[in-house]
Image: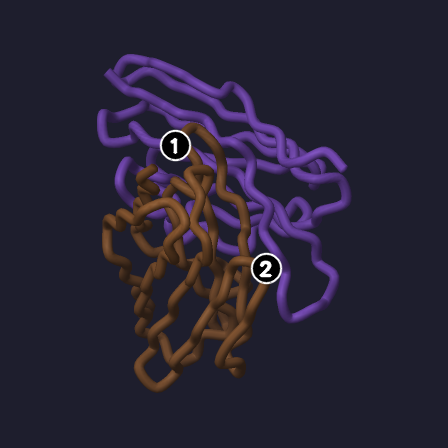
Chain colours: A purple, B brown
Amino acid sequence: EAGVAQSPRYKIIEKRQSVAFWCNPISGHATLYWYQQILGQGPKLLIQFQNNGVVDDSQLPKDRFSAERLKGVDSTLKIQPAKLEDSAVYLCASSSTSGGAQETQYFGPGTRLLVL
Amino acid sequence: GEDVEQSLFLSVREGDSSVINCTYTDSSSTYLYWYKQEPGAGLQLLTYIFSNMDMKQDQRLTVLLNKKDKHLSLRIADTQTGDSAIYFCAETWAGSARQLTFGSGTQLTVLP
């Protein structure tokens, strides 16, 4: 079974530019998460999708960040315009919705963003 | 609100046991997790424990949960150099839609 795929792996941009990250979850996983991991910290949830609907985007800085999962499969996270403090690793995770009380989240390798 | 705290660094000798500690604040935690992150990689789930359990053992890993003190620990027996990584504890809690709240991670260094 293929894991969570993310691209690009690395991105360097200047502040005020825009950038987009892509994630393809494990096949059949209904729930998809985007996390931001700043150096030296644990991942923090930005947005959670179930199929093509948003479950929670309360931690997403909506003035500059947007995300979509139009067909309920892969997802794109965009930052426009980027700020220096957006430098981080952006992790995508997915989980099945089996109805069980515990649903493991599987993480992709992440996209490392550096804003200069 | 919820908060998860971990010590930042731990060094052990190869072959010794490692114990990584974590405290959490939310009494409604349902599941508690340990993830491993190697350099440049995503997070790998190591093990998890349901909040009504005290202990879970999985090969070299032992998880202990003290609900009264809201303290979680991960013991790695016979620690190897390949265990060097950052270890994160994380929790989900009732009403969280299964979202994870992570600690800041503990950097484990295994010395030869």
- Is residue B90 rendered to the left or right of residue A5? left
For label 1, the SS is strand
Badge 1 crowding class, 10 Å Cα cut-off, few under 14, some 14 to 19, many 20 or more, is many
Q: Which one is nearer the viewer's eye here, A35 or B87?
A: B87
- Asked which quadrant contains residue B21, the reply is bottom left
Asked whether the viewer can see residue A43, the reply is no
The residue singled out by tag 1 in the image is A89
Q: Quadrant of the C terminus of chain A?
A: top left
The residue positioned 55% from the left and 71% from the top of the image is B56
Q: Position of residue B106 (x, y in %)?
A: 31, 50
Residue at image point 54% right, 51% down: B45
Label placed on residue A112: none
Q: Are marks 2 and 1 in contact (CB under 8 Å)?
A: no
Q: Amino acid at mark 1?
A: Val
Going 28% across and 13% down the picture, which residue do you hit? A14
Q: Mark 2 or mark 1, which is nearer to you? A: 2
To which chain does the residue with label 2 belong? B
* Distance between the alpha carbons at the discs numbered 2 and 1: 31 Å
**Would you place residue A83 above or below residue A33 in this image?**
above
Tell me whether marks 2 and 1 sit on the same chain: no
Q: Which mark is residue B59?
A: 2
How far across and how far down the image is residue B100, in percent? 46, 58
Q: Of all residues shown, which one is farthest toward the bottom? A: B68
Which residue is located at x 33 percent, y 70 percent? B24
**Residue type at the position of mark 2:** Gln
Helix, strand or loop at mark 2: loop
Front one among B64 and A12? B64
Closer-to-camera residue (A65/B39): B39
